[in-house]
Every structure is written in C-alpha cells, then in structure tokens.
Image (tube, rainbow, N blue to C red):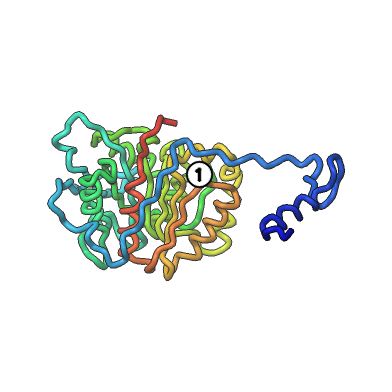
Amino acid sequence: MLLPAAALIFTGLLAAQPPAGQTGPGAPPRGRAMPPSPKAGVCPLPILPALPAYTDQTFFAKADVPHGKIEQANYKNYAGEDKRMHVYLPPDYVGNAGARYPVLYLNHGGGDDDSKWSSEDLRSGGYADGILDNLIAAGKAKPMIIVMPNTRGCATFDPSPIGTDDKCSQEYLKDIIPYVDSHYRTKASREYRALAGLSMGGMVVIHTGFQHLDTFSELYIYSSGHIGEATLKKFDDYYGAMLKDPTTNDKFRVPLYMAAGETDIALKNGQKDLALFDQYGLRNFWVLSSGGHEWANWRRYLYQTAQIMFPDCPAN
C-alpha cells in the first residue's frame, strides 16, 4: 500500500529515533537544559499603531475638537543661564482643576530650539499640539503635558560614565523637571514621565534616559544613534553591565522605541545602537519607515508613540 507523503516523512522520523537509553543523531544531548524563556514586561505589551501615510496631513490638521494650549516658560538653569521651554497643556487642563497629568519631555534636533516641535510649518515644524489634540479627542492617547525644552548647546554624541551627568542631564534633573513639577499639575513620579527626541535630541534620550531610569520609565528615539564606532564602544563600555542586567528590562513600562526612515542619514547609526541593545536582550520596538531625516517622519513617530505612552498598569 502506498502511504501519503506526510506519512512517509513521519514514519521516516520515527525510524531515525534511537532506541530508549541510546544516543544517536535523533537523541537529545545529554545534560543540556533548555535555556530559560524571556520574561514578559512589567506592563502588558502594547500593540504599536500603524504610521500614517508619508503624505498624510490629516492627523495633525486643525479639526473641530477641543484644543490644548501652548505656552512658554522661562527659568534660570543651574549654570545661571536664562532658558526657555514650550509647554503643551491638554484640552481639559484648565477646566479640570483637580486633575494631574503624565509628562512627555520632547527634545528637538541639532541647530533647532524649543519652538520647533510646536511650530506649524510643514518643512520644519512638529505640530505637536495638533497631533495630541486629535489623538486625545479620538480617545487614542492619554491627556498629557508635553514639555519641549531648549537643549541646544548641551546635547552631545559623547556618552558620560554612569554617575557623571552631562550638561543636558544636569539641566533636566536640577532645573527642568523640578520647574515643571512645581508649576504644573503633574503626576510627579517615574511611571508618568517619558523622554523622546529626534536626531540630536535622540542622544539626549540615550544619555539622559538610560542613566536615569529611576526618573523616566519610557524612552523614544527618533532618527538617532551614535556616530562612529568609538562613541558606540564608549557607550558599551559605560553601560554594558547595566544593559546586560536582566532587571533593566523591568524598568521600561513600554519597550524602548527606535525609528528611522529608509533613506535617513541616521539610519545606520540607529541600527548599530539597536544591534547593541539586541545583543543584551533589551526589549524594544524598531520601526523602519519610508522617507528620510525630516519632519514628515518625526510627526508620524510622535503620532505613533503617543498612543502607547503611560499604560494603565500598576506602578513599578
């Protein structure tokens, strides 16, 4: 009797198994245990929403929805410099006086300043308030405060050893966060602070965020990564032990997010950083989009990530 092909394969596999107690090609290696399975994250893994189309402008266009407010705040930093930041307050901030809000700290790129993320310019602006107004109205993002500081002059590609804060990290810890928590109704704990940035602002995320996971619980990197092998090796030397520590994953309430365009000048830099994070088993989202190093992408990345920020799960 002819057997079906699947049956022939199955019977062939059975014939290849050695008798019980013997070794052979089909026997499991003696004394070798299965490796442990990776742990789930501290919060349920979110479903990453799709990016809008490259040419789509509707997701940040002014719509007939409640609108938030952009205001400017001025402060003097630890070095005695007069600094400014732009702050987005969600639509119900004024009317809901008893509410407190999570905070996204959103960093601009090199050569720009704190006004760019809220600028309404298709070539050089982020439309952050329009993006959040529309998402909040649709119930797709949590009402949140967005703080857009001026990190021009302090952002750097050169990492600092853990325990040695660079200028941007010092300003965040000594000035920006204390000012925001004392002047606005924030939820002032790490579970409600996210750090994001584009290009040079992505380096702020890497160098300030990884060193201060006791302050931030979510990191989002748009079109960024270390330039050159020397700076990446230095980052590995300084942070490798922390990245290798399995408890580091437990500090991320949302997996690390990295995104870049397929023609992005920062694509390979980001991929090299990603390879390092993968080497150490750091949980992450990687997004490759159309387009390059441009606002058409960074607006889309903000739209995507704002929808997964500040998950509803117990504090950790």
- In this rendered view, identify the residue nearer to me: 23 or 266: 23
Q: Is residue 239 above or below residue 293?
A: above
Residue 30 visible in the picture: yes
| Residue beneath the point at 84% across and 50% down | 24
- In this rendered view, identify the residue nearer to me: 138 or 87: 138
Number of numbered callouts drawn:
1
| Residue beneath the point at 24% across and 57% down | 59
Q: Is residue 67 above or below residue 158?
A: above
Taking the view exactly as shown, the residue that stands out farthest to the front is 1
Q: Residues within 10 Å of mark 1 (few under 14, many from 20)?
A: few
- In this rendered view, identify the residue nearer to me: 289 or 20: 20
- In this rendered view, identify the residue nearer to me: 315 or 196: 315
Residue 168 visible in the picture: no
Q: Which amino acid, by three-letter code, is at mark 1?
A: Thr
Residue 297, image x and y in percent?
Answer: 34, 62
| Residue beneath the point at 80% across and 47% down | 27
Residue 267, image x and y in percent?
Answer: 46, 65
Q: The C terminus lies in which quarter of the figure?
A: top left
- Residue, disc 1: 164
